[in-house]
Image (spheres, rainbow, N blue to C red):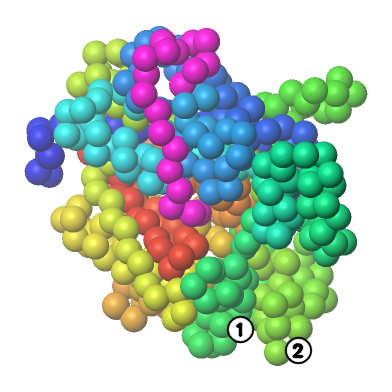
Amino acid sequence: MPLRNGRRVAVVAGCRTPFCKSGTSLKDARAVDLARFVTRELLERTSLDAAEVDAVIFGQVVPSALVPNVAREVSLLPQFPREIPAYSLNRACASSAQAVANASDEIALGDADVVLAGGVESLSDIPILASRRLADILVEASKAKTLGARFRTFSRIRPRDLVPVSPAIAEPSTGETMGQSAEKMAKQNHIARDAQDRWALRSHELAARGTDDGRLTAEIAPWFPERPAEPVLTTDNGIRRDTSLEQMAKLRPVFDRQYGSVTAANSSPLTDGASAVLVMSDEAARALGYTPLAYVRSYAVAAVDPGWQLLQAPIFAVPTALERAGIQWADLGLIEVHEAFAAQVLSNFQGWAAKGWEINPDIINVMGGSIAIGHPFGATGGRIVTTLANEMARRDVQFGLLSICAQGGMAIAVVLERR
């Protein structure tokens, strides 16, 4: 493989918190707490001297107004020297995969040797905003020169001005939510409700199996709740062991109640969690005594018109990543596809099959995916990189691929290799 600047980029290790449905077990934790926790755990697991880290990159989609650069707060942990630079990024659901890609670029270009990349999301702790009219009144009142003028300004507040505003989950360009877009994709690509439910059931069954045999739990840093009476969290709480096709079939569609097929069961849930991945130059990894799990061979990003099929950009990102890697689809031994919705996954498969590629479920999402495990927007990419690299090492697979669709009609694809 031709090397950029003569440097191979190694994925050395990764870990994450349990992924928990928002409003449940991690609801009291701030995003920055989750990010710092998973970083400390990764340093402990690898016995890495934090002074070796050259940069910290974290993805986050819905940042706190109080902590706008979560990566910098991570790099200010006591374990790190204060001089380590850090930045946060947002490529929606692909954010922490993009953090790994950016780390790879910095290392390949010789700007760093050791980078800690990750991502975090707390959808239990999203910022709640004031209405624009209330904000304008409050600003005007703060500038009032007399008490009377301030009261007169406050008297213009109406009850409707007090209604809080949550961050939008709709596309600014189209007004459609991702769920509505998934519903549209299901209709346009003729993805049946039964096929979606079967894929979702598969996700839960394989995630349960990966949890029981220890492959998934090995990647999870146990979370100790603040309340002593609560149990230690060691697994993801969205995996449904008791579900069935019959139960799924009873659920009503969410986004088109009369003619739709996308339900809560065949969609990924809103989730809290964090992930972290240790990325190094091959030389640094060897010098520090680490055996890489895998190497970053290539990556590619793509975008489509959000008004077309919002979550279909992977069909363009993956071919570019494979071309840059100099390999074919048939060379892949493992594939991880982010499951925002079963309709999206099956639409992606349909797009790849149109290229003549064989869709072999035996090598795709072999421990389930985001429908079962959960989807903390900023953290999912780090989870998938870690899971893919670990499973490639277990199976001694030469080439692996990950694919993640993202809000805004975007996607990222990353090719990992072992030999």
Give the quarter of the image for residue 320.
Answer: bottom left
Q: Quadrant of the N terminus?
A: top left
Q: Are marks 2 and 1 in contact (CB under 8 Å)?
A: no
State the SS at label 2.
loop
Q: Is residue 197 visible?
A: yes
Magenta segment boundaries in residue numbering: 75-94
Give the quarter of the image for residue 394.
Answer: top left
Q: Is residue 196 visible?
A: no
Specify the amino acid type for callout 2.
Gln
* Mark carried by residue 258: 2
Q: Residue at x 67, y 42 (%)?
A: 143
Q: Nearer the viewer, residue 50 or 248?
A: 50
Specify the amino acid type for callout 1.
Ala
* Mark carried by residue 192: 1
Q: Residue at x 53, y 68 (%)?
A: 172
Is residue 302 inside the magenta stretch? Answer: no
